[in-house]
Amino acid sequence: MSSTIRAACLVLVAVIIAVIAGCSGFEPKTGTKVTLAFQQGTDVPREKLAELCGYLVDRSKGVAAVDKPRVDSVSDDSLVLLLPGKRVSRRNVNRLIEKTSIDFYHLSAVATKKHPGRPWKLVSASGENNAYIFADHNSHRINSSSQQHELMEQIVKVGEKPILTGEDILRNATYNQTKSGWVVLVSFNERGSETFYEFTRDNRGEYLAVFYNGALVSAAQVDGPIKGGRAFLTGFRTMAQAREAAFEINTGVIPVNVSVKSVRYY
């Protein structure tokens, strides 16, 4: 791309930024300035830059609880995001660009009434940190909260493909409180709805595990075929956790890969 065209694209993006951000003249004088770097050698199309700006603004409102975040500037190799009125921690800044993951796995190594001889048994579905406890025939236990690596390696199995992923979920998640705690209701797209129905139809009594950002949040037994293309994600202890999960699901996937170059407080 020539320098002239590139400059024109940046001007266009600047206009889009202004529309997204609105008036900044009355924003707080303190806050957090985040510089994000594009991957070296990446030529980002202006449409993707506009998507990225919108994504970061929305994400900052949900994850960092910033009222009026805005993209301040865009250059060939970086983007500056302002988070007025908040001293946002580096951890939460990193979360702005982390990819949200939701994966549904069939726990085929866990014993059921139909298959009692399998190597693992679910012995507890509650307790500290809402952990699931699995035990093998030698009474060796795996805690889903503190031993996530062992859980994936020994029970889910490395290389096992998920039944469903975040790509099968629509961006209309909602959260609600039930008798058993806070839940997030997700809806599947056409392919996901069909897959979910077929799995629940053909695997009565089996365990279907839901992992949210790598953590096991649900491991329920299938009672029978589920129509309607919707499922509950459980395991959220507070409204804030459920609300944040729903927001992250609805935000979608970051459109451009970036890294945190610097975080400065002003």
Image: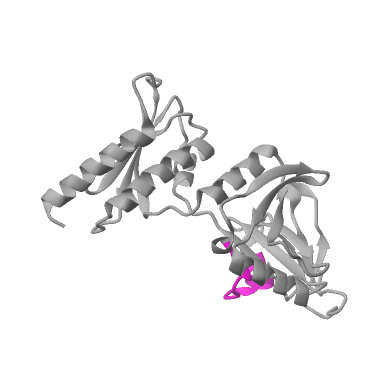
Q: Is 229 included in the stretch rendered in magenta?
A: no
**What's drawn in magenta, residue-wise?**
151-165
Q: Measuring from the top left, give residue 215's x and y in whole percent.
A: 63, 56
**Residue 193, quarter of the rendered image:** bottom right
Left or right relative to 129: residue 190: left
Question: As displayed, is residue 245 above or below residue 148?
Answer: above
Residue 111: x percent and y percent?
81, 74
Quarter-wise, where is residue 68 in the image?
A: top left
Q: Is residue 260 left or right of residue 58?
A: left
Rendered residue at 59%/50% (across/down): 172
Residue 228, position as x, y percentages in the image = 71, 61
Instruction: Give the tally of numbered discs.
Output: 0
Viewer-nearest residue: 14 or 125: 14
Residue positioned 52% across, 33% down in the render = 65
Q: Nearer the viewer, residue 228 or 107?
A: 228
Task: List the single residue furthest toward the right.
Answer: 113
Figure check: 87 above or below 257:
above
Residue 104 seen in render: yes
Using the rendered image of the protein, determine whether residue 119 is visible from the camera's viewpoint: no
Horizontal side of residue 161 vs 130, given as left or right? left
List x then y, in percent, for residue 95. 49, 45
Colouring mode (rainbow / by chain / secondary structure / one colour): one colour
Residue in the foreground of this view, choosing between 151 and 42: 42
Question: Which one is in front, 90 or 68?
Answer: 68
Image quadrant containing the C terminus: top left
Quadrant position of the N terminus in the picture: bottom left
Q: Quadrant of residue 31?
A: top left
Is residue 153 rendered magenta in the image? Answer: yes
